[in-house]
Amino acid sequence: MKELVREKVVEAVREVYGDDAVSVVDRASFEKPKRKEFGDLATNVAFLLARVLRQSPRAIAEEIVRVLRGSGDFESVEVAGGGFINFKLSQSLYNEILRAVVETDFYVSDVGNGERVLLEYVSANPTGPLHVGHGRGAVVGDVLYRIMKLTGYRPEREFYVNDAGRQIKLLGLSIYLRAKELQGEKITLPEDAYSGEIEIWNRNYIKELAEKLLQLKPDLLELPEDEAVELAAEFGKEELLKQIQEDLRELRVEFDSWFSERELYEKGEVERVLRILEEKGYIYEKDGALWLKTTLFGDDKDRVVKRSNGEFTYFASDIAYHYNKIARGYDRGIDIWGADHHGYISRVKAAIAALGKDPDWLEIVLIQLVKLFRNGEEIKMSKRKGNFIPLKWLMDEVGVDAVRFFFLLKRHDTPLDFDLDLAISTKSDNPVYYVQYAHARLCSVLDKAEERGFKPLADHLNLLNTEEERELILRCYSLKYELQQAAKKREPHRLTYYLIELSSALHRFYNRHRVVGGENRELTSARLYLVEGVRKTLEIGLGILNVKAPRRM
């Protein structure tokens, strides 16, 4: 209701005082009065405008009220005290809103003003399967993309494949050593090698890769070690990347592009960007290594971009990657990282500033950890073995709908406790079941009503005047504003909160009012029209989450 009334006030202020005064309305409060007889909402906008227009608040309020009274949107609009404005929405406005919900794409807006945004998320090293933390980042990124697309942005999705550098070499070495072990040799894994153990699956993915490689290349161990390790690294990277892509497809997460780190080196982009920084005077040599003066741009210390042994650091390729993003003409970059990358933010932003771009071009969304619980106890993996819980395992346990919905039950920067028992429950305390059941319940109501000869009609919407009916109408329409806020604040979890609240309002209405039946056929058809509006809104919301909206449960 607040944003709807705010929109109406914006129109009135623009008409009376021009576009320059409109920005003031954004700072005004719109709150429910303490006493119900004062109306549905009150605002202090006239007091804020008074400072700009140098007029009395009451005179400004009276001008705004004069315009609003002629709109037909309010049963009453009154000036109170020294310049407060009290509103009571008219039944015709409720009717107009409900028609918009049922008959239009009311939830679509253009607050993004066509801003071209590159969303980069997941970007897991292809050195192992995706874990549940990757999954949370994937869902946050995917749903944020969907929301931004509906609110006037031009977002694109990218996965940065870290297919170069030391980790890939370690992957190759790990596979090579496991291959030797499979052939009966005793091995000692380096401390930083990949053990490959997945305790919860009782599997070792490195051994599985080694077995598969030996089947394809029986003479692997006859090759010189460097050649065999390189071959194993390339094979393992490709196999794991396929597995990552398969897991993401199952999670219903897609990307517009997969960007290879290796190509940055092959095309000379890493060396090129460092030359640019050197020409600007921001690169210096110390102890045989090359350093970037990131402290000039807010970092706590300078950073190495090329080691004394001639190897480039990950930071060097990250600089080149972000420079590449900027060169592609995006208005903004949004990176979704794990919370353990928090300390990396300042150096990347410093590098962007050194390249002459506003560091605020880049936004970082940090994803906090996920803990899994079963029977009230946390599922813990062996720290000694470096184990983790695969995303694929979680999807198999509770289903993709529950995984996607539960990953958005809290803000992305808040740790998430994922209750496996709750996720598969068919009770109302399971939030995804609760929302899906609300949709299925409405489908059943509409189907049974049709069997009895009733249809949703907009002919008698004036009959929808109870508190519960009006609350439902406003809640449906507020999907538009929730999506706008979710997009602007990068908070896709707001959508799950919204759907739970809408389902709760529906159940309150349903428990107090009979939809089908009774002698008043006009009221039945009007309530069925309302039911269709709520059903459609739930379907839209679940669709944005990419969670199924079942007709039967």
Image (cartoon, rainbow, N blue to C red):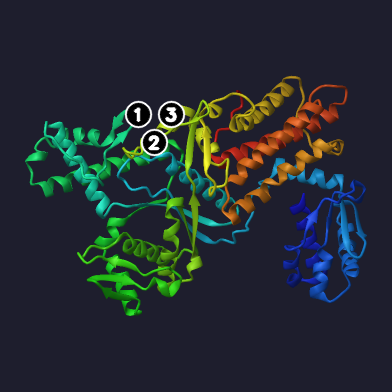
> x%, y% of residue 69?
89, 57
The three-letter code of the residue at mark 1 reads Trp
Whether residue 70 appears in this view of the structure is no
Residue at numbered disc 2:
390
| Residue at the (88%, 65%) spot, across then down | 61
Q: CA distance from mark 3 to mark 1?
A: 12 Å
Q: Tell me which corner region of the image, top left, top right, bottom left or bottom right, holds residue 98.
A: top right
Residue at numbered disc 1:
201
Residue at numbered disc 3:
396
Q: CA distance from mark 2 to mark 3?
A: 10 Å
Q: Earlier in the sequence, mark 1 or mark 2?
A: 1
| Residue at the (84%, 30%) spot, across then down | 523
* Viewer-nearest residue: 233 or 538: 233
Badge 3, how many Cα within 10 Å: few under 14, some, many 20+? few
Q: CA distance from mark 1 to mark 2?
A: 9 Å
Do residues under tags 1 and 2 come within 8 Å of each other at their CB atoms? yes
Q: Earlier in the sequence, mark 2 or mark 3?
A: 2
Which residue sits furthest front? Answer: 384
